[in-house]
Structures are given as C-alpha cells and as structure tokens.
Image: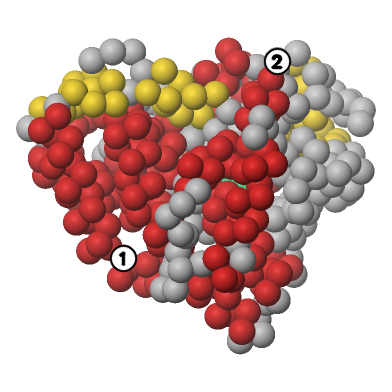
Amino acid sequence: MTKPTNCPVSDLDPFAPDFLEDPYHDALREAGPVVWLEKYDVCAMARYQQVRAALSDWETFCSSRGVGLTDFATEEPWRTPSIILEADPPLHTKTRGVLMSVLSKPALQPLSDDFKSTADKLVDDLVVKGEIDAVRDLAEAFPLSVFPDTIGLRKDGRENLLPYGDMAFNAFGPRNELFERSFANAQRVVQWITDQCQRQALVPGGIGERIYKIADDGKITEDEAALLVRSLLTAGLDTTIFGIGAVLYCFARFPDQWQVLRENPKLVRGAFEEALRFVSPVQTFMRTTTRAVDVEGVEISEGQKVLLFLASANRDPRQWEDPDRFDIGRRTLGHVGFGHGIHVCVGQMLARLEAQVLLTSLVERVERIELTGEPTWRLNNTLHGVDSLPVKLVA
Ligand code: OVP
C-alpha cells in the first residue's frame, strides 16, 4: 500500500516494547487526524473523533478482512476467521444476535449470586493473607474461578486458556518476538481449544450448551456454534483479567479514589468504566477500507489497513477533561474501551458483572489497598495491562 498524499508520516513502532508499555500516544494523536506508519504501511488514527467515526462506519471500515495487520483478502489468517469479530453484516448480524441472546444482562442475571459468594470467599481469604499479588490472586483468580464454569468447560486442561488468549491477541500484530514467543506451544494449545468447542466436550447447563441449542433451533449450523464457543474462549478471559487488573492498578496507584468508593460503593460501576477508559486494556484494533475515503482531507485508498488507537482516543483532551486523571466520578459515557458500533464488545455485561461483583466484595472488606512494590506490565501486541501488582490489603 502507498501513503496517502498530505498525510503526516511517523516512524513509531506501536508494537515495540517501549511503546506497548505506554500506549497513550500523545505524539501520534497530535501528529494529525490520520498518520502514516511507514514501518507497517498502515494508516493510524488516534484521535477520539476519528476513531469513533471509523468504528461507526462498518461499511467503509470493514472487519471481514481481519482486525489485525493480516489482510485476509491477500494473506492466510493463522486460524479460521472468527464469524463475529472478523465478519461483516449479514453474517455478523446473525452471529451477534446469537451471542447477545446468551450474554445479555437478563440472561446473566441468574449468575450473580453465585459470582458474589465466590468473590466474597476469595477476598475473605486474601484479607487474612494481607500481602498479595493483585494480578495473580484477584484479577486472574476470580475470572478463572467463574468464567470457565459459566461456559461449561471441563476441569482438566484449563491451563491452556490464558496461553490461547495471549496468542490470539498477539496475532493481531506483526510476527515480532512477542508473537513468536506466545506461539511456542501453539499446536497443543490450539488443539485443546478446538476440542473444547465441540458439543460433546461441554458440560450441561453452561453458555456453550445454550449456543448449541440455538443451533438445534436452526438459527446457526453446528460448525458455527463451535466457532462461537471459540470466540468466547478467545475473547472472554484475558480481556476481563486485564480489565480487572486495570481497576485494581488504578486504586492502588490513586488511593484517594478508593476512599471515594468506600464512601459511596454505588460508584463501582463508574469506577470500572473509568478504569477501562484510563487504561484501555484493548489498545488497538484495525479495520480495512472497502472504498477510497476522505478523512479530514486525507484520501485513504481502498484496501488500506487502518490502525485505530482505542487507548489514545480514551485520553484525547479534545474529548476528555483532564484525561490523564483517574476520576471515578467522571462521566465516562462514550469511552471506546469496549469499542463502538456494531462490533462493540458483546461480552461487556459479563465483564461488568465479574468486575463489579469483585469490587463490591473488596469495598465491603478492604479499607486500603497499599502498593508494596512496582507493578510490572505484561506485553502483548493488542492488550495492555499489569502482569504483577504487589499490594497489601488492609481490612
Ligand atoms: C475483543 C475478540 C478478540 C479476539 C477474538 C475474538 C473476539 C473472536 O471472536 O474469536 S473481541
């Protein structure tokens, strides 16, 4: 692909380690509404308004050619494309409807009491321990103890879930060192995931079984049911772990905000949304243009990959007042941490349920979350979040 005329050029590598550690990209955002990344021959947008507009216009900025660097029209994807993430209407409309029906707020409501008692027990034990790693012990432990059962996965082999998520999110980026490292055991991990998506592998009573029942009703095929279960296993765990990690990181770093929440526990919902805006666990997604399109005077040609910086848009001072401040009382409506438009996160109700339940258990029991060491970041070509977060929970 060739650079559009009058488009500023950047030699930044958004998939290099230093960039991935600090992905809010003032430089990229301020360079212009569209920036050409010469390292990858892609257009980038990092301003709120353009990111949101591109996500809204799925007819021009399509997903069916992949939402990573690989252009499915000309290159082989690493796996059968997702029939929801990497699809456009009308296929997307059908598959989205299926996942909506099993992931809507009313559909998930029956899970909340169970989730709450699991969270209460987890937090009770951690408060006794006092000094913990909030990533391992909370952000990972809680989703791992509720999500696989919610889907209906068997107990053995679950250690493959996180490596698979890491692979899938790295695969949206270039074949750099991060990518290669996460694909070390690819064959074994992919095989396990593929096997768990089959009807006979799923435990009755879970969301997986419900998707297959929708196939029985004739709305989708059995093969499509398997691919939709695969979508849940790909997108449902790492993202939530990074999201919960984000909110715990924010409270450890900004203890005054924890006191605000302690005084008004109703703010748990707003707190999670603000952490998603502030940290943006999913940093980037791409689209491919289906036609030539003018964006703020820059003519982008057909078939062009466009990299959208969700993290940067969520810190755009054109949109947010004092964007680098974590403020749980802020109006977060319109943040693009879950994306926007027809592909906006279909699992957001489940993510919110998990995060809010866990935060509620914490706020009921923990007076202070004290940082006891420097957090470390886990690097991934798409995801951004804490890898370790040493804290002391003070009852
Ligand atoms: C964040 C997402 C991410 C990765 C994979 C899939 C969805 C999928 O559908 O497989 S959404």
* Residue 314, visible in the rendered structure: no
User: Which residue shows up at 34% across the image and 32% down it?
Assistant: 136
97 shown above or below 114: below
Residue 160 versus residue 346 in the image, above or below = above
Q: In which quarter of the image is residue 4?
A: top right
Q: Quadrant of the N terminus?
A: top right
Q: Which label's residue is closer to the chain start, 2 or 1?
A: 2
Which residue lies at the image location 26% right of the left edge and 39% below the top edge?
A: 329
Residue 168 x %, y %:
64, 41
> Which label belongs to residue 111?
1
- Residue corresponding to mark 2: 12
Q: Where is residue 139 in the image (x, y as percent from the top left)?
A: 35, 38
In this rendering, position of residue 287 left or right of residue 315: right
> Residue 392 location, x and y as percent?
18, 23
- Front residue of 256 and 237: 237
Placement of the C terminus among the 4 image quadrants: top left
Q: How crowded is mark 2: few (under 14 residues within 10 Å), some or many (20 or more)?
A: some
Point 53% across, 43% down: residue:
160
Residue 158 percent coordinates (x, y): 47, 48
CB of residue at label 1: within 8 Å of ligand 1? Answer: no
- The answer to whether 231 appears left or right of 66 in the picture is left
Which numbered tag is attached to residue 235?
none
Amino acid type for the residue under numbered disc 2: Leu
Secondary structure of the residue carrying numbered label 1: helix
